[in-house]
Image (spheres, rainbow, N blue to C red):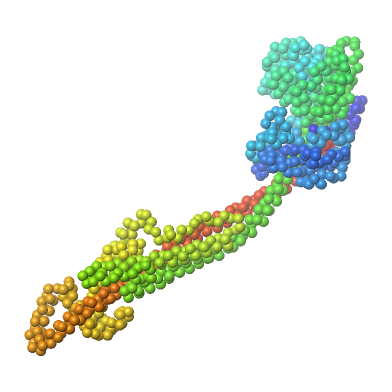
């Protein structure tokens, strides 16, 4: 991260002889502005945290540098640089953005390659002029500092590599991590406020083990107070104060854990003599105590750091960074409370990994660090040592490197403790430190908070800018979804009633057509059977007359053939209904094509016409039991329509009336002649007809229709008839005629009349409404209703499938419209919020004069 700073006090950093009163007024003004900026930033950050929890899952962006091959380098810095924007929860989705610099902070906008070639930015030029390494300035742009999340797979992974990101984390999980980071930043700002309001200044002296920290502190105090050894001996935090703060008494206060320290409350500490400081430090190495050391400095205020007559100064001697992880962690935590960091590094070893990590972390807040390269007198090649140290400082603190003359000092602290020995290098160091701490308080005390605030605001801008892009993308996507789904949804709502009417029409029309066709086919079949002909022109024919010896079997075969032809007519009606149903199903399919939107999968159900009218398992027994309630209808009732007439024993029973239909002939010859129009040709009286009547009468005599009494009465009347002389004279001719007529009837007419007689009887049984039956339960009407119901059932199922598919698609489109509207509303609210955040951060920068560039 590259930092360019204009001193807050408006004075050059190298001016060492300025008096405090010359800058005090400017310091107070900057302090008040900074406190206002802290409050405003805290309000923005708290609002962002609440917005992340309640309204919008704030996405954490990552930025990758574009390839140099695609974008040729320019000798002149540009206003905007290109970055690939992605998010930790979805690193594969990358968007090209322009990262734009301004004095109001960074901004992110979607742009093409040509958008990056804008006019130069003065601030970028200014940053480049202050840096000898322009690539570092560009490469670091767009990185998070304060709100940075460690989402790398390993400590040495590349943060700019999407493969190194924990992309498996859900957006909510990353948002929770960001929420924790925001909470940490809010807590840190509370400490910043306390530090800015505090009139004292804390100077932390730290460094690697055996770098000479304690020796350096003793040199600053001009007396050997801190324990010094070639082995690491400083294990405690020794905070040195002016004895004037302790009523002028030199002593050591050992702070008690868990208690707020107060110099006036002895219950919060233990008193120890200054002479016992070394034993306290060495004997409590594992406990790491916190000590308050009060010392008197007899030097003049113009020479002393502690007794400076301006502000209260505390000088903290901290343990070495790489002694163990616990002490290192403690130092890292303590540095947040520090105004000035004095880092002591050995000229022999330079900066270790622990020191580099510490200083990099500290530079996020403090633009300037005070570096002391100790034991420098022991180095032979001093120029090389200076060059290597300064190159390392440039990496983690560019501001310190640019002001190295005042902030980086190569000294030998041990030599400064020698009496009566001049040490101009250490004197220059002490003068620079006094000036940095006392005179340039806007730099030493306020600048760390200013730097932290600016970097935090820059991180907020990155979050706001990236999420504004996400919100705008969501708005565009929602608009596209609405443009696609809403017209379809509205059209389906308007056409829902039309679809219902069309389906009802198909069902009703097809069912009526099937019923009418069935009635026509079965009525025609019954008429043909009534005339003694097969009901349909199929492969069904009447049996041949086998002779009078097998006339009974002939009558039974004729009955079976006629009943079979009626069954065939029923099958023909069912086949016709199947074709009608197929047509209806196709119409319903066309309705689906008409009313369902494009891209919706059509029904994959296949209609099998042969499955219609099949008797389903488990329903036959019920049908048989129910048939007993209407046994006179359709030779057993409407409930047995599934069983063919030719298979019913009661319909196959043959009687003498199938041979000689006496009642029919009686009505034909002696009635009004209106019963059976198909037999009108038999209405003319002939001798053969008279004989048939006689034979019929004789048949009745031999049958069950006439009892014994009737037979005796007939015999008596015949005997009386033949007792008459005239009757006896006509008896011979009459008997002869009867014999001749009966013989002719049996030979000529009987084989022809049996099919008609049986057909008439079958027809009469199927069209006659008997007791307990209704008109709808007759053979024709019952089958017409059955076929109509089966057709309606199939079409209703197909209609139901289309209705459900239409309903499901309309609900899906409705949900799409609702979700898109909610997304657009939510995204628009987020877009306005993030734009407002960017505006407010710019106001904070302007009001607090936080002028810097990343």
Query: In which quadrant of the rendered view does residue 312 lie?
Result: top right
Residue 707 point in image, percent of width and height = 14, 73
Q: How many marks?
A: 0
Q: Nearer the viewer, residue 253 or 348?
A: 348
Q: Nearer the viewer, residue 550 or 785?
A: 550
Q: Quadrant of the N terminus?
A: top right
On the picture, is 149 further left or further right than 222?
A: left
Q: Residue at x 88, y 38 (%)?
A: 75
Observer able to see residue 500 = no
Q: Quadrant of the C terminus?
A: top right
Q: Residue at x 84, y 22 (%)?
A: 388
Judge whether 153 appears above or below 218 on screen.
Answer: below
Q: Residue at x 35, y 74 (%)?
A: 528
Q: Extreme bottom residue here?
A: 726
Q: Nearer the viewer, residue 435 or 627?
A: 627
Residue 203 point in image, percent of width and height = 80, 23
Residue 407 point in image, percent of width and height = 86, 25
On the picture, is 529 further left or further right than 361?
A: left
Observer able to see residue 157 = yes
Residue 417 point in image, percent of width and height = 85, 12
Q: Residue at x 12, y 76 (%)?
A: 711
On the picture, is 652 further left or further right than 724?
A: right
Judge whether 421 appears above or below 264 on screen.
Answer: above
Query: In which quadrant of the rendered view does residue 253 lie?
Result: top right
Q: Nearer the viewer, residue 758 or 312?
A: 758
Query: In which quadrant of the rendered view does residue 31 lie?
Result: top right
């Amino acid at each position: 991260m590259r930092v360019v700073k204009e001193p807050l006090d408006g004075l050059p950093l190298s001016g060492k002889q300025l008096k405090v009163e010359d800058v005090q007024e400017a310091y107070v003004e900057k302090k008040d502005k900074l406190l206002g900026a802290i409050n405003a930033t805290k309000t923005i950050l708290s609002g962002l945290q609440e917005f992340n929890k309640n309204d919008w899952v704030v996405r954490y962006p990552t930025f990758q540098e574009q390839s140099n091959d695609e974008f040729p380098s320019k000798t002149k810095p540009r206003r905007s640089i290109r970055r690939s924007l992605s998010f930790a929860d979805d690193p594969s989705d990358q968007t090209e953005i322009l990262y734009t610099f301004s004095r109001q902070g960074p901004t992110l906008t979607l742009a093409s390659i040509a958008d990056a070639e804008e006019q130069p930015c003065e601030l970028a030029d200014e940053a480049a002029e202050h840096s000898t390494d322009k690539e570092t300035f560009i490469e670091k742009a767009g990185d998070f500092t304060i709100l940075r999340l460690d989402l790398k797979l390993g400590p040495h992974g590349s943060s700019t590599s999407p493969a190194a990101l924990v992309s498996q984390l859900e957006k909510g999980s990353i948002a929770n991590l960001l929420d924790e980071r925001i909470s940490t930043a809010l807590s840190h700002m509370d400490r910043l406020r306390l530090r800015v309001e505090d009139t004292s200044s804390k100077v932390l002296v730290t460094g690697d083990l055996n770098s000479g920290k304690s020796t350096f502190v003793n040199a600053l105090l001009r007396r050997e107070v801190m324990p010094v050894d070639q082995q690491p001996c400083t294990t405690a935090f020794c905070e040195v104060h002016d004895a004037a703060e302790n009523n002028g008494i030199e002593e050591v206060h050992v702070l008690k854990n868990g208690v707020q320290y107060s110099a006036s409350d002895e219950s919060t500490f233990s008193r120890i003599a200054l002479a016992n400081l070394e034993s306290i430090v060495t004997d409590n190495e594992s406990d790491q105590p916190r000590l308050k050391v009060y010392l008197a400095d007899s030097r003049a205020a113009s020479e002393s750091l502690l007794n400076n007559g301006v502000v209260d100064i505390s000088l903290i001697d901290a343990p070495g960074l790489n002694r163990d992880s616990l002490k290192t962690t403690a130092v890292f935590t303590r540095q947040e409370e520090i105004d000035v960091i004095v880092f002591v590094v050995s000229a022999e070893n330079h900066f270790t990994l622990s020191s580099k990590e510490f200083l990099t972390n500290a530079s996020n807040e403090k633009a300037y660090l005070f570096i002391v390269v100790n034991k420098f007198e022991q180095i032979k090649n001093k120029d090389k040592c200076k060059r290597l140290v300064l190159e390392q400082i440039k990496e983690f603190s560019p501001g310190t490197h640019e002001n190295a003359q005042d902030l980086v000092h190569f000294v030998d602290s041990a030599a400064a403790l020698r009496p009566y020995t001049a040490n101009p290098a250490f004197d220059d160091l002490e003068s620079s430190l006094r000036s940095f701490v006392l005179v340039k308080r806007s730099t030493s005390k306020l600048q760390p908070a200013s730097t932290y605030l600016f970097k935090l605001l820059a991180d907020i801008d990155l979050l706001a800018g990236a999420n504004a892009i996400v919100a705008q993308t969501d708005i565009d996507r929602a608009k596209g979804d609405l443009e696609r789904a809403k017209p379809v949804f509205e059209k389906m709502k308007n056409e829902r009633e039309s679809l219902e009417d069309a389906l009802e029409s198909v069902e009703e029309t097809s069912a009526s057509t099937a019923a009418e066709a069935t009635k026509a086919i079965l009525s025609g079949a019954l008429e043909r059977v009534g005339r003694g002909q097969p009901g349909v022109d199929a492969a069904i024919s009447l049996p041949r007359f086998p002779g009078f010896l097998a006339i009974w079997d002939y009558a039974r075969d004729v009955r079976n053939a006629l009943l079979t032809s009626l069954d065939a007519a029923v099958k023909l009606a069912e086949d016709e209904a199947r074709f009608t149903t197929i047509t209806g199903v196709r119409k319903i399919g066309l309705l689906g094509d008409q009313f369902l939107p494009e891209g919706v999968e059509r029904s994959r159900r296949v209609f099998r016409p042969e499955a219609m009218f099949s008797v389903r398992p488990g329903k036959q027994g019920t049908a048989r039991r129910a048939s007993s309630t209407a046994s006179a209808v359709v030779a057993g009732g409407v409930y047995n329509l599934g069983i063919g007439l030719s298979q019913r024993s009661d319909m196959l029973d043959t009687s003498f009336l199938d041979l000689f239909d006496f009642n029919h002939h009686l009505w034909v010859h002696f009635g009004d002649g209106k019963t059976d129009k198909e037999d009108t040709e038999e209405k003319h009286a002939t001798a053969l007809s008279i004989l048939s009547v006689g034979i019929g009468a004789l048949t009745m005599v031999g049958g069950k229709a006439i009892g014994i009494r009737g037979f005796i009465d007939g015999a008596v009347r015949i005997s009386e008839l033949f007792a008459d002389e005239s009757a006896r004279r006509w008896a011979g001719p009459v008997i002869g005629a009867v014999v001749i007529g009966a013989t002719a009837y049996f030979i000529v007419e009987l084989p022809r009349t049996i099919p008609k007689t049986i057909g008439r009887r079958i027809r009469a049984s199927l069209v006659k409404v008997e007791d307990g039956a209704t008109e709808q339960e007759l053979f024709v009407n019952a089958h017409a209703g059955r076929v109509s119901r089966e057709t309606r059932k199939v079409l209703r199922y197909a209609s139901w499938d289309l209705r459900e598919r239409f309903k499901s698609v309309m609900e899906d489109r409705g949900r799409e419209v609702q979700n898109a509207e909610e997304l657009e509303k939510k995204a628009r609210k987020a877009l306005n919020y993030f734009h407002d955040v960017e505006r407010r951060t710019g106001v904070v920068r302007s009001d607090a004069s936080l002028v810097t560039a990343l």
